[in-house]
Image (cartoon, rainbow, N blue to C red):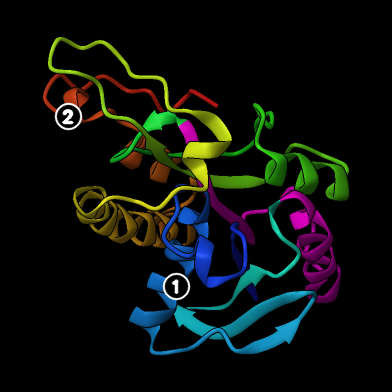
Amino acid sequence: MKLIVGLGNPGIEYQFTPHNAGFLAVDRIADDCGVVLSNRRGRALTAKARLAGHEVLLAKPETYMNLSGLSVAALVRELELEIPSEDLIVLYDELAFPLGRLRISANGRANGHNGVKSISGALGTEEWLRIRIGVGKPALADGREIKAGGRDYLLSQFRKQELAVLDEVLDRVEDAVEAVMTEGVSAAMNKFNRRPDDSENGSDVSKEK
């Protein structure tokens, strides 16, 4: 069985905030699979589903973001998964990318993300598969990037127009998860790790971690 974990904070007050993009992605997959994450195991809300021909366990840790590793490690042990492995896919928000982008990576540093730091600490390695969901501010028309405001921004509610963009991104995250499972990590990275303006010129950024 494959384990798909979305990171976020439990509680209605956090539901539609940038830091809960991982939760929202797992909820989208669950909705499309016709299941509800209502079982409790490994300190997470979970649901079994069938996705792209594979049995999967969808999970949302209830530990709060900073202790996500406790839940992920418990589920990895319960399912007897080997790490590193394509059988574990973690979905989470990435402030460094603008809203609308996503990136598949086979490893990587926390870069200030406490949920990632917790998982790497609990698993004893940074070699685990993740899909990072951009939640940063979009660039200005002249190409200049806007720096989002860190913690305050991550825990503030998405605006209506941002939710519209996120809705489309969540569908692509699900497509990316399916591509990893059916085509392999390298092929999925080649397909999804392109900037929007790279699609025409064929630039390949899949080697970025």
Q: Give the camera-side residue of 151 and 199.
A: 151
Look at the picture and state if 207 lies above or below 69: above
Measured from the top left, where is residue 146 in percent x and y?
A: 34, 19
**Which quarter of the picture shows residue 53?**
bottom left
**Residue at coordinates 61% horizontally, 47% vertically from top-left?**
129
- In which quadrant of the rendered image does the C terminus lie? top right
- Numbered circle sitting on residue 199: 2
Q: Which residues are magenta?
A: 66-95
**Who comes first in sequence, dot 1 or dot 2?**
1
Tell whether 18 sits left or right of 48: left
**Which quarter of the picture shows residue 135?**
top left
Q: Give the camera-side residue of 14 and 119.
A: 14
Residue type, mark 2 in image: Ser
- Numbered circle sitting on residue 202: none
Residue type, mark 1 in image: Asp
Count how many numbered circles sit on residues in the image: 2
Tell whether 94 sits left or right of 10: left
Q: Give the camera-side residue of 187 and 166.
A: 166
Measured from the top left, where is residue 23 in percent x and y?
A: 51, 63
Badge 2 element: loop
- In which quadrant of the rendered image does the N terminus lie? bottom right
Badge 1 element: helix
Marks 1/2: CA–CA distance: 28 Å
Tell me if residue 83 can be seen. no
Measured from the top left, where is residue 110 in percent x and y?
A: 68, 32
**Residue at coordinates 84% horizontally, 75% vertically from top-left?**
78
Look at the picture and state if 187 lies above or below 204: below
**Residue at coordinates 26% horizontally, 55% vertically from top-left?**
163
Tell whether 45 sits left or right of 92: right
Measured from the top left, where is residue 18 in percent x and y?
A: 45, 48
